[in-house]
Amino acid sequence: MSCVLRASGSNFDVDEFLKVSSLDALTGFHRGAVQFPTSSLTRRSGSSGMNASVSTREIADLSGQVEAAVGFLRENQQELRRLRDFPGLERMDLDFPVEDRDAVFQRDAFPYQLLSLLGGLHIGLIISRYPVHSAVTDQVFMQQ
């Protein structure tokens, strides 16, 4: 799991956008479709959109994810502007997964280069915190 670009809108025609896009979508989804078909819950998506991989760096390597994200944003500025201005798009975010660390205080900083690129493209910033996985934790889950 690593940094992902998320783009969506209730009237966003994701299929039309992706027809000629240079962005490689991990997933595309459509308003009204069941979000998790293998789940017992029947929750339908309220919007259409896509997720695209921004980085392949590990969750523990936030500085590497940031470096990859800056490169991604610079390399894809023209296509990201087209996405930003595409009819029906309401929201774009860069979602960084970050490990929760065993510390009294946890701080993660983002450089102005990244923030400037995000602002110029109207892309929001999300920090998703995840518990640290260890061999002990994995064994507990495997036994259940």
Image (cartoon, rainbow, N blue to C red):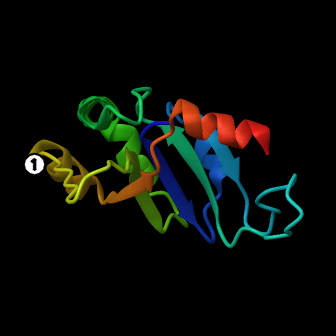
Q: Which of 13 and 110 lies nearest the eye of the viewer?
A: 110
Residue under circle 1?
112
Q: Which of 47 and 133 lies nearest the eye of the viewer?
A: 133
**Horizontal side of residue 71 vs 136, given as left or right:** left
Image position, residue 95 (x, y; %): 41, 51
Q: What amino acid is labelled 1 in the image?
A: Tyr
Dot 1: what SS?
helix
Residue in view at x 47 percent, y 50 percent: 131
Residue at the outermost left position: 112
Q: Which of 114 and 60 lies nearest the eye of the viewer?
A: 60
- Residue 55's place in the image compared with 45, above or below, is above
**Horizontal side of residue 77 vs 85, given as left or right:** left
Image position, residue 89 (x, y; %): 51, 63
Residue in view at x 76 percent, y 60 percent: 35
Is residue 20 visible in the rendered image? The answer is no
Q: Residues within 10 Å of mark 1 (few under 14, many from 20)?
A: few
Q: Which of 35 and 107 lies nearest the eye of the viewer?
A: 107
- The quarter of the picture where the C terminus appears is top right
Residue in view at x 73 percent, y 59 percent: 30
Residue in view at x 19 percent, y 55 percent: 107
- Residue 113's place in the image compared with 115, above or below, is above
Q: Quadrant of residue 67?
A: top left
Image position, residue 45 (x, y; %): 72, 68
